[in-house]
Image: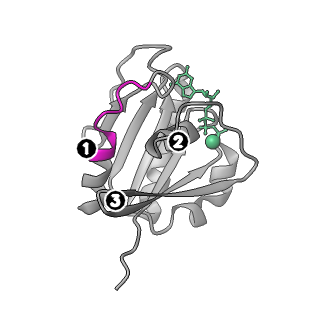
Amino acid sequence: MKKISPKICIIGDKSVGKSSLVRNLLGLPFQPVKSDVDIQIYQKIENNLSLTFWDIHGGEKFLSLEKNYLSGSKLCILVADLSVRETILNLIQYKEIFLKYNPNTPVIIIFNKKDLVDTVVNWDEEDTCFYVSLKKNLGLENLMKTILQKVKK
Ligand SMILES: Nc1nc2c(ncn2[C@@H]2O[C@H](COP(=O)(O)OP(=O)(O)OP(=O)(O)O)[C@@H](O)[C@H]2O)c(=O)[nH]1
Ligand SMILES: [Mg+2]
């Protein structure tokens, strides 16, 4: 029987670095990302397991497409920009929406743009948090390993 490739949803406000994160996970170099497509889906084979990353533009677009975007997901990666406080606060709402469609599903938090500000966020201990700079490729060493552990659970 063909194995299903776990669906991993990336969520966060506009310009926090969602598409930059997907590029990093796919092993592509950091560069400006520009796309007019609302939802983009990428596949990557990692340790013999196929992973499907779902990327969407931030903000209103996400809220209007949430059901189709989120249903059937095995993992959520929430992304915020450490230098823009509102993008961190909005993660609480995004997490709630994700869990509504996918109860008891793991969540990973990415606090991005650590190159701009080096602060620590007081966040729910049940989620694994990474403080990263996608631009400088910092803090991402254990991310793929953690993703694999969470989707295999
Ligand atoms: N300084 C800094 N800039 C970053 C970092 N990561 C991404 N950026 C920049 O932030 C901007 C937005 O990055 P994207 O990856 O397009 O963000 P996004 O969340 O996909 O944005 P939308 O698709 O519009 O919602 C781009 O100009 C990136 O080059 C980082 O770690 N540090
Ligand atoms: Mg994007």
**Residue 121 in the image: x percent, y percent?**
36, 24
Q: Is residue 79 toward the left or the right of residue 105 in the image?
A: right
Q: On the rendered structure, is 92 left or right of 37?
A: left
Q: Quadrant of ligand 1?
A: top right
Residue type, numbered disc 1: Glu
- At label 2, the amino acid type is Arg
Tell me the chief SS of the magenta region. loop
- Quote the CA–CA distance across marks 3 and 1: 11 Å
Label 1 packing within 10 angstroms: few (<14), some (14-19), many (20+): few
* Residue on which disc 2 sits: 23
Q: Could you tell me if residue 58 is visible in this image? A: no
Alpha carbon distance from label 1 to label 2 = 26 Å
Q: Nearer the viewer, mark 3 or mark 2?
A: 2
**Amino acid type assigned to the residue bearing label 3 in the image:** Thr
> For mark 3, what is the residue?
105
Image spot of residue 151 (x, y percent): 31, 59
In the picture, the quarter occupied by the C terminus is: bottom left
- For the residue with label 2, is its CB less than 8 Å from the closest atom of ligand 1? yes
Residue at the (31%, 33%) spot, across then down = 141
CB atoms at circles 3 and 1 under 8 Å apart? Answer: no
- Tell me if residue 31 comes above or below residue 152 in the rendering: above
* Magenta region, residue range: 137-145
Q: Secondary structure at mark 1?
A: loop
Residue 146 appears in the rendering: yes
**Tally of marks:** 3
